[in-house]
């Protein structure tokens, strides 16, 4: 997936990080897992979206790619 395939909120954040307006997070995988975990744990979020977030977080945790 490329940034151009993402929603407007993701594209805006990408632009802000690239311009230095928002800070870049070197530990991006850990940050992503935390964000996905928060969505998966939030009972206010629809169950289908919670399941998608849980699946994505689990795949990141299992993957062999690690933050440096």
Image (cartoon, grey):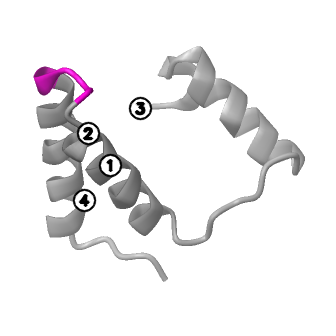
Q: Are marks 2 and 3 in contact (CB under 8 Å)?
A: no
Specify few, some or many for label 2: CA neighbours under 10 Å numbering under 14, 14-19, or 20 or more.
few
Q: Tell which circle, 4 or 3, labels the residue nearer the N-terminal end.
A: 3
Secondary structure under tag 1 reads helix
Q: Position of residue 42 (x, y in %)?
A: 26, 39
In the picture of the structure, the residue carrying the numbered disc 3 is 1
All told, the count of numbered labels is 4
- Side of 15 where 8 appears, left or right: left
Q: Tell which circle, 4 or 1, labels the residue nearer the N-terminal end.
A: 1
Q: What's the residue at 68%, 38% (across, down)?
A: 14
Q: Tell which circle, 2 or 3, labels the residue nearer the N-terminal end.
A: 3
Q: Quadrant of residue 13?
A: top right
In the picture of the structure, the residue carrying the numbered disc 1 is 38
Q: What's the residue at 52%, 18% (across, down)?
A: 7
* Magenta-tinted stretch: 44-48
Nearest to the eye among marks 4 and 1: give it: 1
Q: CA distance from mark 1 to mark 3?
A: 22 Å
Q: Tell which circle, 1 or 3, labels the residue nearer the N-terminal end.
A: 3
In the picture of the structure, the residue carrying the numbered disc 2 is 42
Specify few, some or many for label 1: CA neighbours under 10 Å numbering under 14, 14-19, or 20 or more.
some
Q: CA distance from mark 2 to mark 3?
A: 26 Å
Q: CA distance from mark 2 to mark 1?
A: 6 Å
Give me the disc on residue 60: 4
Q: Quadrant of residue 52?
A: top left
Q: Position of residue 10 (x, y in %)?
A: 58, 29
Q: Quadrant of residue 46?
A: top left
- Seen in the picture, residue 27 relative to 35 is either above or below; the reply is below
Q: What's the residue at 63%, 64% (across, down)?
A: 25
Q: Are marks 2 and 1 in contact (CB under 8 Å)?
A: yes
Q: CA distance from mark 4 to mark 3?
A: 15 Å
């Amino acid at each position: 997936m490329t940034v151009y395939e993402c929603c407007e909120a993701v594209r805006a954040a990408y632009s802000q990080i690239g311009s230095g307006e928002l800070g870049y997070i070197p530990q991006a995988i850990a940050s992503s897992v935390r964000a996905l975990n928060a969505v998966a744990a939030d009972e206010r979020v629809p169950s289908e979206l919670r399941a998608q977030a849980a699946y994505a977080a689990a795949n990141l945790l299992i993957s062999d790619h690690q933050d440096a």
